Image (cartoon, helix red, strand yellow):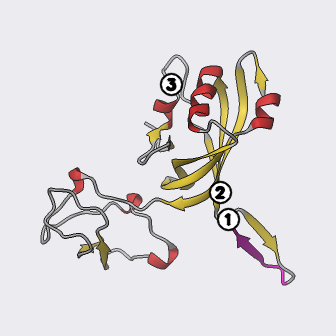
Amino acid sequence: MSSIRLGTTYPPTDIETVLSTTQLTGKREPRTRFYEAGQFLDRLDGYITPQGFALAVWTFDILDQTMVDTLRTYCPGFDATVYISTRIEDGIYQDYEATMIWPFKQMERRQFNGIYLGLEFQFRHLKVVDYEMDESEAVTVGEAATVLLANYPLSVSDSVTVGESVTVKLLSITASNSVTVGESVGVSIS
């Protein structure tokens, strides 16, 4: 399974499932690029200032017409709001709400006998999706729990060192927890 995912609802679906790839068609996971801002401005003092929201670009080396048609269902117009999981660093993936941009100009130039080569899909205006625990992760107060940080969005200001304790405010409570909404629960990072 791929860690690259796409969906119109959260959580998004694995890209290999979306494209219905098989051993016969081969894997179609895109190459990804992640930019921390939409544009970077050169300053007079020689430094660079990032501006705008983060941006992700997925490049599919080869797609057939059926796969393109499937991707079109996620973005039926010029753009559409979708949910993605994309690589932000080597081996690190993050979930985002994003605006998917359909590559109209590339579609015209990169098609040969129903095969599309090197299509690039942009995902703009990336907003981190808040992580919500599902029933399989539910714990009661006082019970020890391990939190997988790869699924919990941390920003630079939230950095935590191993062994340090942090408090996570639960945003979503399932019927099986005994925590009330808005109550804080201590989590130990190890």
- Residue 117 relative to residue 82: left or right: right
Work out whether residue 100 or residue 62 is closer to the camera in this orientation and state it. 100
Taking 40 as reference, is 57 left or right?
left
| Residue 122: mark | none
Secondary structure of residue under mark 3: loop
Sequence-wise, the earlier of marks 1 and 2 is: 1
Disc on res. 21: 3
Residue corresponding to mark 2: 55
- Please name the amino acid that badge 2 sits on: Leu
The spot of residue 120 in percent (x, y) is: 70, 40
Residue 147 visible? The answer is yes
Highlighted range, magenta: 45-52
Inspect the image, locate mark 3, and give the three-letter code of the amino acid beneath it: Thr
Q: Is residue 134 above or below residue 28?
A: below
Q: Is residue 14 left or right of residue 186?
A: right
Q: Residues within 10 Å of mark 1 (few under 14, many from 20)?
A: some
Query: Residue 176's quadrant in the figure?
Result: bottom left
**Amino acid type at mark 1:** Ala
Instruction: Mark 1 and mark 2 in contact? Answer it, CB < 8 Å.
Output: yes
**x, y percent for residue 90:** 54, 54
What residue is rendered at 27% in x and 53% in y?
134
Instruction: Give me the residue at 67% from left, 65% from top.
Output: 37
Q: Which residue is mark 1?
A: 37
**x 38%, y 60%: residue:** 131
Would you say 141 lies left or right of 74 here? left
